[in-house]
Amino acid sequence: MNLLHILSLYFKLKDDPGADIYPRVFIFGGKAAPSYTYAKEIIKLINAAADLINHDPAVRDMLKIVFIENYGVSLAERIIPAADVSEQISLASKEASGTSNMKFMLNGAVTLATLDGANVEIRDLVGEDNIILFGLTDQEVFQYYHDRSYHSYDYYKNNPVLHRVLDALIDGSIPGVQAEGRDIFDSLIKYGDEFFVLRDFEDYALAQKKVDMLYRDPLKWQEMALINIANAGVFSSDYTVLRYAAEIWNVNSKTRLF
Ligand SMILES: *Cc1c(COP(=O)(O)O)cnc(C)c1O
């Protein structure tokens, strides 16, 4: 979904070089398990899109994609404190908790998120004004499963931005990913879009627009960042161990919780 949105910005800038888009660098880090072919295809597509966009003079200084190789703790230590926006965009109900969302919050990034996993706790801590939320709720996802009423093709058909971006996966616009682009296109359109990517896309794009606008006001952005940092203490490991000691293990601790 993140990549689909970046591609939509890319096409927007190609059509209208004066489009009012705040310059952005999108950083990806991650690994696919050896047998997780589909995840590997997504990684290849991100890298192919990075190749295209980063070498296109038409969007120079406006749009950039960085895919960090061999993501691990040492890289996380450097990237997480440097990030402005923490993208926590799993489909609601899919993420058990999430811990990188806590690391980003503690380091002053503003969270752009679905109401999933610990994003819900972050929302409760910082309030709706200091997190940027979008997408289906878990209850809405369960309702779709129950009704079997989600048809991703309708979103492809009815949303011209999404249509253009999805076509780019299969029409050669992104060089070198014929097979991967086709598999991803098919998974989103032919095979039901298990993660409701097309359903959440428009709302995600609106949330990204909100990020784009908010970031232009540095004082406002710093206020949001500070409110996040100030409320991140409950995620500290000291606090977590103390709560385990008190509530789960029932052992006496000499340290007080507060
Ligand atoms: C925190 C962390 C993860 C796990 O991130 P989640 O958001 O909990 O999935 C994975 N890899 C590295 C290097 C991390 O630091």
Image (cartoon, rainbow, N blue to C red):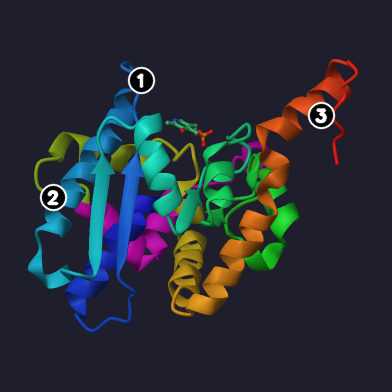
Q: What's the residue type where badge 3 is placed? A: Arg
Left or right: 38 as drawn, with respect to 96: left
Number of numbered callouts drawn: 3
Q: Which mark is residue 51?
A: 2
- Per the image, the residue denoted by label 1 is 33
Which residue is at 54% across, 43% downward? 103
Query: Neighbour class for label 3 at 10 Å: few (<14), some, many (≥20)?
Result: some
Q: Earlier in the sequence, mark 3 or mark 1?
A: 1
Q: Which residues are magenta?
A: 144-168
Q: What's the residue type where badge 2 is placed? A: Asp
Q: Earlier in the sequence, mark 2 or mark 1?
A: 1
Vertical placement of residue 203 versus 152, above or below: below
Which residue is at 22% across, 73% downward? 13
Classify residue 164 by image quadrant. bottom left
Find out whether residue 251 is within the magenta segment.
Answer: no
Vertical placement of residue 164 versus 216, above or below: above
Residue 78 image offset from top left, x and y in percent = 37, 43
Disc 2 or disc 3, which is closer to the eye? 3
Determine the residue located farthest toward the front in the rendered image: 254
Residue 129 image offset from top left, x and y in percent = 67, 68
Q: Which mark is residue 216?
A: none
- Per the image, the residue denoted by label 3 is 243
Query: Neighbour class for label 1 at 10 Å: few (<14), some, many (≥20)?
Result: few
**Does residue 121 appear anywhere in the picture?**
yes
Find out whether residue 155 is within the magenta segment.
Answer: yes
Q: Earlier in the sequence, mark 2 or mark 3?
A: 2
Foreground of the two, 247 or 187: 247
Gap between marks 2 and 3 measured at Cα: 47 Å
Q: What's the residue type where badge 1 is placed? A: Ala
Left or right: 77 as drawn, with respect to 224: left
**Ligand 1 neighbours mark 1 (CB distance < 8 Å):** no
Residue 251 image offset from top left, x and y in percent = 88, 15
